[in-house]
Image (tube, rainbow, N blue to C red):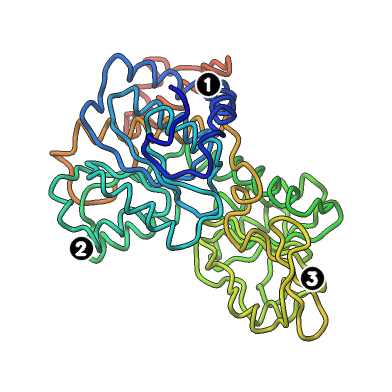
Amino acid sequence: MPVTEKLAGDVKDRNLAETGRSRIAWAGAYMPVLAQIRDRFEVEKPLKGVRIGACLHVTTETANLMLALQAGGAEIALCASNPLSTQDDVAAALCEYGIPTYAIKGEDNATYYSHIEAVIATKPHMSMDDGCDLVTTIYTKHNHLLADMIGGCEETTTGVIRLKAMQKDGVLPYPVVAVNNALTKHMFDNRYGTGQSTLDGIIRATNVLLAGRTVVVVGYGWCGRGVAQRAAGMGAHVIVTEVDPRKAIEAVMDGYRVMPMSDAAKVGDVFVTVTGNYHVIREEHFKVMKNGAIVCNSGHFNDELDLEGLKGLSRGMTVPRTFVEQYDMHDGRKICILADGRLVNLAAGEGHPAAVMDMSFANQAMAAAHIALNYKTMDKAVYDVPVEIDEEVATLKLSSMGVEIDTLTPAQVKYMASWSEGT
């Protein structure tokens, strides 16, 4: 299809589509599980006639997910789930593939929400969210559409937290599958994907040497584990801050120093927040940081950092490098914030490697098909990905890697199901 302005969507430059197609194909070569699901969907059409509204990071990996859903018969409209995470060439290419895409890297807040509204205007039957902004906008502003909606999927920890809060308050509008909670998602995407891509984003933005520096990882969930592991592997001295005593003791036993943020703020060179919580680095922490401290966030929302508090401590801000905002403090220190405090791995880098997103988006595609088949029997609740889907994704991934594993013998199956065996 020739590049034309008549195609639906709002992207930076339609002429970037050729580059986007090439990069989408490159990522697809590293996503063999999703490719197998796409082939299956092409035949079975489990999503035929289903309109999907997607609010996701518009990357090469996401593009391959969109193409798999399209192969399954879905009609899709896509917008960005973060103002800085869009890859503009990918957005242009998706429009050419007949998937209206509303996403421009660096879009302001008004444009961001206008793009969400554009997706909602397609009257989706199913939502596919990364952070829950699409669901909450539909619920608060477009309640009239809920009667025709059958369910949704949520990609990230922050979104699952919000959805469970909606369920607790009795306002969750339809069943949602928490794709993030699949073991083949959060154990690998969050740990290996976030770990590698976060450091990649930091290095691209700053070209800083991590070896010998003190890196403070704020939060020791799966993402924090990955960041800490990769930073240590590059020779950094890692400090972990936590509020959960169980995660804190795990960090200690993994070999890291653990201390309160009030202490870590004084000694850290690089700070990475991965908590999904609010203002975990605040004004009192900025006050005691070293001159030249680098602060970034790899959680979904930039309100993990108290940026307004930082502005109040500074006399101005300059941009010495792309994605580096350097605040000149009243006392003469300089503190650098990366990518406006937004997801540094996607804002300053390319996000997770395709090989790990292969599993995440395989779960996403199969969860969508599961909802289309079973929504009539599902309550308005947050569901985990069915175990059989999670296990199938792992099996397909191992096969694609040429790895074989054992199977239980009949005697072992019997033993594991028995209570009578003992000493």
Q: Amino acid at mark 1?
A: Leu
Question: For residue 365, which quarter of the picture?
Answer: top left
Q: CA distance from mark 3 to mark 2?
A: 44 Å
Question: 10 Å neighbourhood of mark 2: few (<14), some, or many (≥20)?
Answer: few
Q: Residue at x 68, y 57 (%)?
A: 323
The x and y percentages for residue 212 are 86, 55
The x and y percentages for residue 88 are 55, 41
Q: Is residue 59 left or right of residue 68?
A: right
The residue that label 1 is drawn on is 398
Q: CA distance from mark 3 to mark 1?
A: 42 Å
Sequence-wise, which precedes: disc 3 or disc 2?
2
Q: Name above or below for residue 317 compared with residue 346.
A: below
Q: CA distance from mark 1 to mark 2?
A: 40 Å
Question: For residue 65, which quarter of the picture?
Answer: top left
Q: On the rendered image, what quadrant is the N terminus found in?
A: top left
Q: Which mark is residue 267?
A: 3
Q: Is residue 192 left or right of residue 177?
A: right
Q: Which mark is residue 170?
A: 2
Q: Amino acid at mark 2?
A: Gly
The answer to whether the residue labelled 3 contacts the one labelled 2, judged by CB atoms less than 8 Å apart, is no
Sequence-wise, which precedes: disc 3 or disc 1?
3
The answer, for residue 152, to whether it is visible in the render is yes
Q: Nearer the viewer, residue 405 or 189?
A: 189
Q: Amino acid at mark 3?
A: Val
Q: Nearer the viewer, mark 1 or mark 2?
A: 2
Q: Residue at x 41, y 27 (%)?
A: 97
Q: On the rendered image, what quadrant is the C terminus found in?
A: top left
Secondary structure under the numbered disc 2 in the rendered image: loop
Q: Residue at x 61, y 55 (%)?
A: 250
Secondary structure under the numbered disc 3 in the rendered image: helix
